[in-house]
Image (cartoon, rainbow, N blue to C red):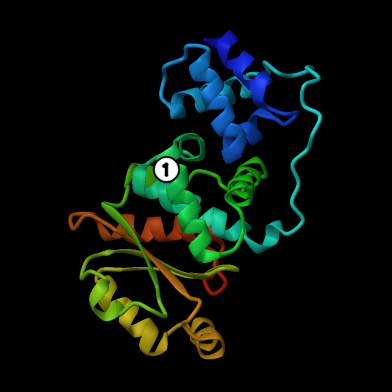
Amino acid sequence: MKEAIEQAYLATCQGYSADRVVVDPDLNGAYLLECKRLGLEQPPASLNKALLNLRKSGHFKGQKHTTKRTTFTDIDSYQFAAEMAARFLERQHQVSLDDILCDLALVAEFDKRASEIAPNFSVLQYRWAALNLRKSKHLQPELLAKVAPPISVMTFKVGYDDLRTAVPNQQGLYLFYSKSGTIYVGESENLRKRIGKHLDHSDNKGFAQWLWQFGMEDLFLEIHLLDAKQAKRIRKALELELIRSRNPMFNIQR
């Protein structure tokens, strides 16, 4: 299989890296078709992951097939959207970024979520931004969340959703964010009640001032529902992990 994967890649890469072939829809489509032509019957996710694993093992190191670099000048405009989309799917499905980018259904959901946060960019740009974040160690695993995973993860466009009824009366974590970054992270025994207080007049002065200045039209809310039996200390620890990982504007780092 290794030889066929390499052959399919070299036949379709057009001078680009293995990473680019996995995340570029056009190159990836050609690569998967070539894999099929060569008799590989594995699902696309397996074929893509096999190519990534070859690259990670150093299999292509020293070869001269990669002649083109992938760069985008406006990555700051959508990099945070890529981060939030990747983080959402990591929590919702308990998967890695490689799993997301290699699986055609998961990466389509990633594209949709990233474009909702920062619209009008290509799917290649969102995917490449996520890869760059991982390579620069800005997508480090949130380990406690893997030990105590949420039972559900949900997102809302605050300016257009009636959160008074949409948010469940359950315990969990919440994140307010815009397309430029995470604004505030919190936890609550009753998410609906707590979110309602923020929207009426947040008790965090910095966040309240932000809402007064910018409004809710471009504001998003992500909530992580926790099992009703989950202890308060675990909820607090999960909140602390989120604050350290997401670096929100109006939380104090501890």
The reply to whether residue 245 is visible in this rendering is: no
Residue at 55%, 59% in the rendered image:
81
- Secondary structure state at the residue bearing disc 1: helix
Q: Residues within 10 Å of mark 1 (few under 14, many from 20)?
A: some
In the current view of this chain or complex, which residue is farthest to the left? 229
Among the 4 quarters of the image, the one containing residue 189: bottom left
Direction from residue 115 to residue 24 in the image, left or right: right
Residue at 68%, 19% in the rendered image:
10
Residue 120 appears at what percent x and percent y?
Answer: 59, 63
Among the 4 quarters of the image, the one containing residue 75: bottom right
Name the residue that disc number 1 marks: 106
Direction from residue 214 to residue 95 in the image, left or right: left
* Above or below, 217 relative to 108: below
State the residue in front, 193 or 168: 168
Residue 69 appears at what percent x and percent y?
Answer: 78, 38
Residue at 78%, 17% in the rendered image:
63
Direction from residue 144 to residue 193 in the image, left or right: left
The reply to whether residue 54 is visible in this rendering is: yes
> What amino acid is labelled 1 in the image?
Leu
Residue at 34%, 84% in the rendered image:
197
State the residue in front, 13 or 176: 13
Residue 186 appears at what percent x and percent y?
Answer: 40, 69
* Above or below, 141 relative to 188: above
